[in-house]
Image (cartoon, rainbow, N blue to C red):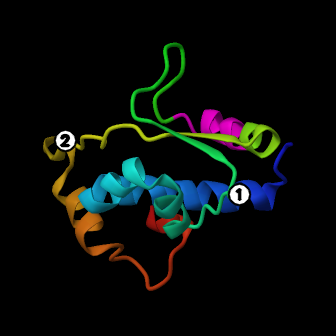
């Protein structure tokens, strides 16, 4: 079952929350392994009671680690089959040495150019 644009956006937002939580909170990452239904629900992904949940921390051969289109397709397949597979790649490494002083300032303090989020701030 293909997701409409709003459903896709809602799934992507919830899946992103799962990734960020798993990468930044060891307790959440542990719950994701031991109690995946509960951890996923905390991030907005409610699954049917009889759903099979598979958490994959190593990308299967032939897939791109962290490919969002793959994860959306797995969610859509889960809606059809009841088997939901979630790829949770390792925490991405950010090499701060490659960021300029301005980049670091923007990351730490946000935009210094205006008071609203807009395309000129990025």
Q: Nearer the viewer, mark 1 or mark 2?
A: 1
Residue 43 place in picture, x, y as percent: 51, 66
In the image, is 47 to the left or to the right of 92? Answer: right
Residue located 29% across and 66% down the image:
106
Image quarter where the C terminus lies is: bottom left
**Which stretch is magenta?**
67-75
Residue 119 picture quarter: bottom right
Observer-nearest of 110 and 41: 41
Numbered-mark total: 2
Q: Is residue 36 above or below residue 67?
A: below
Q: Which residue is mark 1?
A: 48
Q: Which residue is mark 2?
A: 95
- Contact between marks 1 and 2 (CB within 8 A): the answer is no
Counting residues from the start of the chain, the first of labels 1 and 2 encountered is 1
In the image, is 47 to the left or to the right of 94? Answer: right
Pointer 1 local density, CA inside 10 Å: few below 14, some 14–19, many at least 20: few
Q: Is residue 53 above or below residue 4?
A: above
Residue 23 place in picture, x, y as percent: 31, 52
């Amino acid at each position: 079952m293909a997701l409409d644009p709003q459903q896709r956006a809602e799934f992507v937002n919830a899946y992103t929350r799962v990734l960020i939580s798993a990468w930044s909170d060891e307790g959440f990452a542990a719950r994701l392994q031991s109690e995946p239904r509960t951890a996923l629900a905390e991030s907005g992904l409610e699954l049917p009671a009889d759903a099979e949940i598979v958490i994959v921390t190593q990308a299967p051969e032939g897939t791109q680690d962290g490919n969002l289109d793959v994860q959306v397709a797995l969610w859509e397949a889960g809606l059809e089959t009841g088997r939901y597979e979630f790829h949770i790649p390792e925490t991405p490494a950010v090499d701060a040495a490659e960021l300029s002083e301005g980049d670091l300032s923007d990351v730490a303090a946000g935009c210094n150019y205006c008071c609203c989020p807009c395309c000129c701030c990025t």
